[in-house]
Amino acid sequence: MTVKTSISLTDDQEAYARRLVESGHYPSLSAVLQRGLEMLRHDREKRDAELEALRSLIQQRRVGAFLDLDEGEAQTHTMLAAKRKAREAL
């Protein structure tokens, strides 16, 4: 389903979007804006997932045994990779 809406762009934003359409990168101005919103959503979801993983890790550290820095970093990277993979599978 699509919804029509009115938006305001700066002159530079509008010119850039039109250049993307004219160069064949996108079929319309709507497609440019839709892609931009999808990228923003993806970035926000990624950031939110990483923050949640870090919050979870902090909570685990508060109640768990002490880990040295190298072990903690390794576990953090593993957890973040698992969260990214799970999110990408959606």
Image (cartoon, helix red, strand yellow):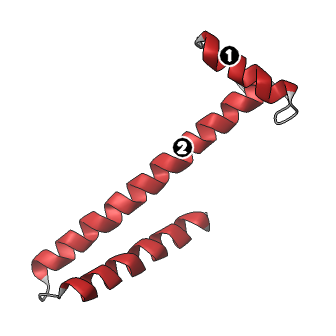
Q: Which mark is residue 14?
A: 1
Are there few (<14), some (14-19), or many (20+) residues within 10 Å of tag 1? few
Examine the rendered structure and indicate whether residue 18 appears above or below residue 39: above
On the question of residue 87 being in view, the answer is yes
Query: Is 75 on the left or on the right of 29, as rendered?
Result: left
On the question of residue 6 being in view, the answer is no
Q: Earlier in the sequence, mark 2 or mark 1?
A: 1
Examine the rendered structure and indicate whether residue 26 appears above or below residue 72: above
Residue 52, horizontal then vertical, whole percent: 33, 61
Viewer-proximal residue among 87 and 3: 87
How far apart marks 2 and 1 lie (CA) works out to 21 Å
Are there few (<14), some (14-19), or many (20+) residues within 10 Å of tag 2? few
Query: Is 47 on the left or on the right of 13, as rendered?
Result: left
Query: Which residue is drawn at the image coordinates 39% and 54% (left, top)?
Result: 48
Query: Is 74 on the left or on the right of 63, as rendered?
Result: right
Between circles 2 and 1, the one closer to the viewer is 1
- Which quadrant: the N terminus? top right
Residue 33, horizontal then vertical, whole percent: 67, 29
Q: Considering the numbered disc 2 on the image, is that residue within a helix, a strand or a loop?
A: helix
The three-letter amino acid code for the residue at tag 2 is: Arg
Query: Which residue is drawn at the image coordinates 26% and 88% (left, top)?
Result: 71
Viewer-proximal residue among 85 and 16: 16
Q: Quadrant of residue 11?
A: top right
Q: Which mark is residue 41?
A: 2
Query: Which residue is drawn at the image coordinates 55% and 49% (left, top)?
Result: 42
